[in-house]
Image (spheres, coloured by chain):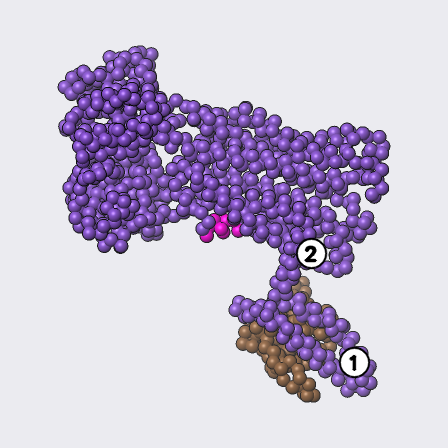
Amino acid sequence: MFRRLTHLFEYLFRRRRLEDDLDEELRSSFDMVADRFAASGMPAAEARRAARLEFAGLEQVKENVRDGLVGSGLQAFLQDTRYALRGLGRRPSFTAIALTTLALGIGVNTAVFSVFYGVMLQPLPYRHPEQLALIWSSFRTAGHARAPVSGAILGEIERRNRSLAGVAGIWTITRTFTGDNPEQVKCARVTANFFDVLGVHAAPAHQGRTFAKEDSGGPAIMLTDGFFRRRFAGDDRLIGKGLAMDWENTLVGILPPDFQLHFAPDSNVPADVQVFDTFDHDVYKNRENYYIRLVARLKPGVTMAEAQSDLDRVAKEIGGAYTEYATENLRFTLAGMQADAVRDVQPALAALFSGSAFVLLICCVNVVSLLLARASDRRREIALRLSLGASRGRIVGQLLAEGGVLCLLGGAAGIAVGWACFRGLLAIRPERLARMADGGLNGPVLAFAAACSLAAALLFGLVPAIDSFRLDYMAILRSGGRGLPGRLHRRAGAALIVGEITLAFVLVTGAALTARTLLKIEHVRPGFEPRHLLAFQISNGIPGGSVADWETELAALPSVELVGATSHLPLDTDIPNWYSPYRPEGVGEHEAATLVADLRCITPGYLAAMGAHLLEGRYFDAHDRAGARQVIIVDESLARTTWPGQSAIGKKMFAEHVTAHGFVPMLSVVVGVVEHLYSHSLTKQVRGQIYLPFEQSKRSPLTFVLRTRVDPLSLAPTVRRMLHDRSRTAAMAKVRPMTEYVSREISPVSFTAVLATIFGALALLLAATGVYGVFNYQVSQRRPEMGIRMALGARSRDVLGMILREVGTLAGAGVLIGAGAALVAARWLGTLLYGVRPFDPLSYGLALLILPAAALLGGWRPAGRAAAANPAELIREE
Amino acid sequence: MDLLQGTLDLLVLRAVELAPMHGVGIADRIQQVTRGAFVVKPGSLFPALRRLEQKGWLEGEWAPSENNRRARYYKLTRAGRAQLAEEKRKWYRMTSAMNWMLESE
């Protein structure tokens, strides 16, 4: 290898010397042979002639030697490249169109891939992230396939597994930093080994540490870098000290600046936790509460499948050892941490990625048709060179070089376009795709762009090359290089148009379906009225009074209409969901075992303030207080499934209440039925809902909602001041208009819809220009035919009609195939759609109309040109 | 007799096995030893020499020839010697296979 390289080097840079060497060797050999002839008695002149005969043309010998050398290929390649550049320069409009098309295709793909890479492929910022996995439990009464676990189960998994290097737990709560500027923060409670499992160390800049085993249940806390800088100005002297907080604490370390939690939204572990503390050491004894989310690190060399079967065994053992799981069919599901975190966005991103690939394909089809047109223009040139003895290999090399140069330039321009598009996408990025910001133009993205260009280059070089292989050059030279492209080229052009329209059809229907989904979701009624609603969260109760007092004070504000509070605001995924079993009166324990509902504590005004419609009965009122009869309100879906055909009012059920002794099921009377408040997503009712009066079942934090007459955010300063007047150390958090929660749910959908629409529009434009390109060329090739037709009496109208009919036929074929392809693709799109069927007639109808129209538009000018020509001139040209 | 595809390399390597030789010498030797069966023309000899040199099996060096012309002498390298052994083995294997086929009943 090395030797070959040195030879290549010699060939390229010391070519002169090598040539001289060769010259001298050949000359001396020639002389030797001549000498020998002379020695056998030939006269000198005769001897030289004989020798020359032997060497059969010194130049030819040299040429043979050169061809056999390493590097001669490269030399030829450079020559071809120069030639290709000159050729492209001579046809600026062809070059411009081809380059723009390519840059567009590669650019769109580069941008979409950098999103895809940033979100889906980029490894999580932990040590060996591929060994990290989440463990979800499922059991009969969990009502959820991705349930968290209790401390006892965490302990059992830790003890019994053989495949994990470590298992850690996490759960999020809220805490308040007191002091001059009180602030409520998200706090993650973790097991002491949490950071060891992730492989995260404390930021070395601050001399701190992560949690140690002895910290369990102790005061140790850690802060994220951003929060530490913002609130404490990054003051290292605070490490080892206690901070002003509603919780006794000692700051032991700061997390590195790039640290972030990456969990799926439905795991209720928000990415922007600012504080970490530890579970009590007796957390492992808790058998009742299922709230701990598990992260595990696999032992090196252990595969996911092996670890999963190990956990299956552990689940069986626990089922045997704990009586409460005897009939529960306890199971654990292991999910790769990264895959789990992006599980919800994966279908959308995959669809967008395929959409952009389709756009690139259409771009390539357009450029191929341009190149084919050019190749048939160049047939005469190629035929001439073949007949003069150029090898076909050399000519194919040249065509490849032209494709290569085109793609290199197109790829470079595409990367620029891609970067610009990516900046644009960043601006409309939904919160769920935050990680795409780390995408950008990094190595893998550039490699992807290069791979796209290379694939295109091969395609572009090979298609004309294959065309040239089928060349009968004598026939072409005889015919003067014209007229023969005929059937073959027309068939290729037709195939390209049909292919292009097929692809465009899929993209246009995809765009229409996602756009209609977006419209539907924007108009969905989430069970409440999000406009004119301000929400904010307060933990640890209301200082200096009761919640009822505080609500009265708020309600007295002139621009406030209604006030209420809840333990779990719809669509707020930061607070771990509260869901529990319930049992209607008269239903046996066993039958009720799988009944699970979402529970929420609310104040009397909450449902009215949210704008939720009361369907039956009444809202809670001031009489529903502690010590009074236990009452509940249920949502419509729970009422309908539990007491079908009957009124739910007055019915009784056991529902979990929060008491001084923890979570206790208590017999409660249904006093009202409300519509379902969409809590987890705008499109899915996950579980039935049970509302408990806050006074009978107190939970913290509470989220207050104010129905306002003015812009909700304009009230924020007033409300803050009111709380501050009550206590200088109380804090509120997440002061937001309710519309923000809703738009956060919509933004991934609108991101998809915007991109899909862009793809659809691009596809239309490209299809129209593609049809134009192919027909424009064909018309120019078929001028003699047109001339003869017109000379034989066809009118311009007939010629126009003929060309447009051809366009129409091809478009019709493309649309038919496209409709079939779109039906297949739409089924796959199914999970991304809402409110429209995958076979939505409107979307298909739109594509059916718009695509043939675009094709006819593209064919219009070439057809017009053919029709406007003067027959006498056309024939004379022949 | 026409050269079999791929045998030229073997012939050249074998020709210089015993002592370094220049191009014309190599051609002569092949012709003599094969009793005139193989005549290697310069048009194929010189490309082959350069190719073998590039592969590192031959090493060319300028030296005065027997009648005092400057000539490029080719010497077998270590890699060349190994290659020759390998080619020989292959050749024997092939010829015996051919023989078995031709002499079979």
* Residue B79 is at least partly visible in this image: yes
Q: Which residue is mark 2?
A: A395
Residue farthest top in this picture: A646
Q: Using the numbered discs, state the Cα–Cα distance from disc 1 to disc 2 in whole angstroms.
A: 38 Å
The residue located at (33%, 34%) in the rendering is: A266
- Counting from the top left corner in percent of width and height, residue A264 is at 35, 38
Label 1 sits on residue: A48
- Which residue type carries mark 2? Ile
Of all chains in the rendering, the one displayed in purple is: A
Quarter-wise, where is residue A683 in the image? Answer: top left
Q: What's drawn in magenta, residue-wise?
A: A443-450
Element on which disc 1 rests: helix
In the figure, B37 relative to A443: above or below? below
* Residue B85 visible in image: no
Give the chain letter for brown: B
Between A748 and A486, the one lying in front of the other is A748
Above or below for A705 versus A369: above
Disc 2: CA contacts within 10 A as few (<14), some (14-19) or many (>=20): some
Q: Label 1 is found on which chain of the structure?
A: A
Residue B33 x/y as whole percent:
68, 79
Which label lies toward us, 1 or 2?
2
Q: Amino acid at mark 1?
A: Arg
